[in-house]
Image (cartoon, grey):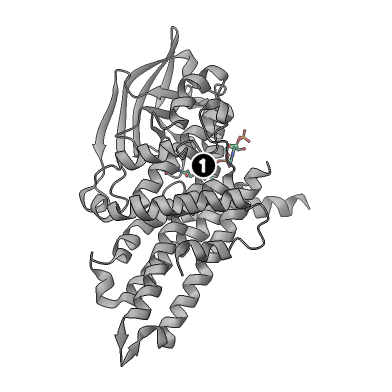
Amino acid sequence: MSSTESTTTMFQGWPEVDESKKLLIEQIHTFAESKIKPLAAKLDATGEFPTELVQQLAEMGIMGMMVPEQWGGSGMDVVSYAMVMEEIAAACASTAVVVSVNNSLVCAPIALFGNDLQKEKYLKPLAQGKKLGCFALSEPGHGSDPAGLECSAKKVPGGYQIRGTKNWITNGKEADTALVFATLDKSQGHKGICAFIVDTKTPGFQVAKLEDKLGITASSTAQLFFDDVVVPEECLLGKPGEGLKIALNTLDGGRIGIAAQALGIARCAFDASKRFATEREQFGAPIAKLQAIQWFIADMATRLQGARLLTWAAARAKDQGLRYTKEAAMAKLAASEAAMWITTKAIQVHGGYGYTKEYVVERNFRDAKITEIYEGTSEIQRIVIAAQELAALSKT
Ligand code: CAA
């Protein structure tokens, strides 16, 4: 059974997965299998950014999937986005995160909080994939706790001057546009934080360091330094002091994208494990005949599908305009932990072969780990879920 067949059967009970969605997934699946997958191992080994793949995905309307057509996007819903992200990640997790950050962390907040000028000037080229975006929130001393960030913004005639360091910035090396969070007044706590759209060609913008990572090696992770970068007033996104809310609202959406990325990584490892188990013989029969292996396969299938349903439920809640903070956190928690578990067991199914670079599960295992960390660690997702559950109880 191909990956698409197995996904199609899972559409049962999801009336919103209509023929057009199935066609879209089929198209992306074919592209991912024929164009992305053959390059993935080389991209992983060299750390080369997937420039051509990103261009091709842009031509297919995938870089600004949920942005209205008026602003250069494809005007699709979030369920479609999650399904597309899973397909791309099943072929190459690095390419998937490049796409996810541009869609969820840069296009989405400009589409939601931006004015028409910002949408015309900044959003359109990002959504069309003519430009690439990054989301600059984390700092060396502020990862899980962005409310205390130290990057500063100062009002200057005609605009703002930004100074500070940002860490762990996906797409940081290649980005044309950075969404940067900085505080205008630290004494106001999180109410001093603002969001700025920054053209990375502005004098003072520097890529200070590139991280050498365990996985997703073909996507860049950069430390950025803003050395008194002056941006015009038009670059303030939303109102002064709204920065943290914009960041956290944006991360709610981002978490659906990362959940879908984790699903793709897990699915790749799961499919590889099923193939290997039916081909590999020990004790005179395929190892798939052994109950130990069957239990791994059963648990992989169950964890993968459970996480997928949570991811689609979060996406559907967002599509319906409901608050989906908890649902997105649950989706990311379940999918990233499923991905880590499934890729670990996938290596176990493959035995010694799985520990070598010859088999995709080795890459899947390395790529899975980051999904438990970026856009909020698993521990942060638990904080978000518990806070929502307890708040709901205190209201009753
Ligand atoms: N949407 C909108 N606003 C929100 C919100 C949400 N989901 N959650 C909270 N807020 C608002 C609150 O209402 C509050 O505003 P008021 O004071 O006006 O009421 C304000 O934000 C602060 O809320 P909290 O006091 O609850 O916030 P906190 O400081 O205690 O933090 C947290 C809560 C859940 C721990 C949050 O800080 C968090 O999610 N941390 C993780 C950050 C993260 O995911 N970082 C990853 C960065 S991106 C990345 O990984 C790099 C990359 O390139 C991929």
Rendering coords of residue 331 (x, y %): 55, 55
Total label count?
1
Q: Nearer the viewer, residue 277 or 392?
A: 277
Which residue type does callout 1 highlight?
Leu
Q: Is residue 243 visible?
A: no
Label 1 belongs to which residue? 251
Q: Quadrant of residue 305?
A: bottom right
Q: Is residue 6 left or right of residue 229?
A: right
In the figure, residue 38 lies in which quadrant? bottom left
Q: Where is residue 291 drawn, in percent x and y?
A: 44, 87
Give the percent coordinates (x, y) of residue 268.
40, 63
Report the residue at 25% width, 40% height from top: 210
Quadrant hosting residue 204? top left
Q: Is mark 1 within 8 Å of ligand 1?
A: yes
Nearest to the observer: residue 345 or residue 329: 345
Disc 1 element: helix
Q: Nearer the viewer, residue 111 or 147?
A: 111
Residue 56 visible in the shown view: yes
In this rendering, the answer to whether 234 lies above or below 35 is: above
**Which residue is pictured at 50% across the width and 44% down the height?**
254
Q: Residue placed at 49% from the left, 59% from the top?
A: 335
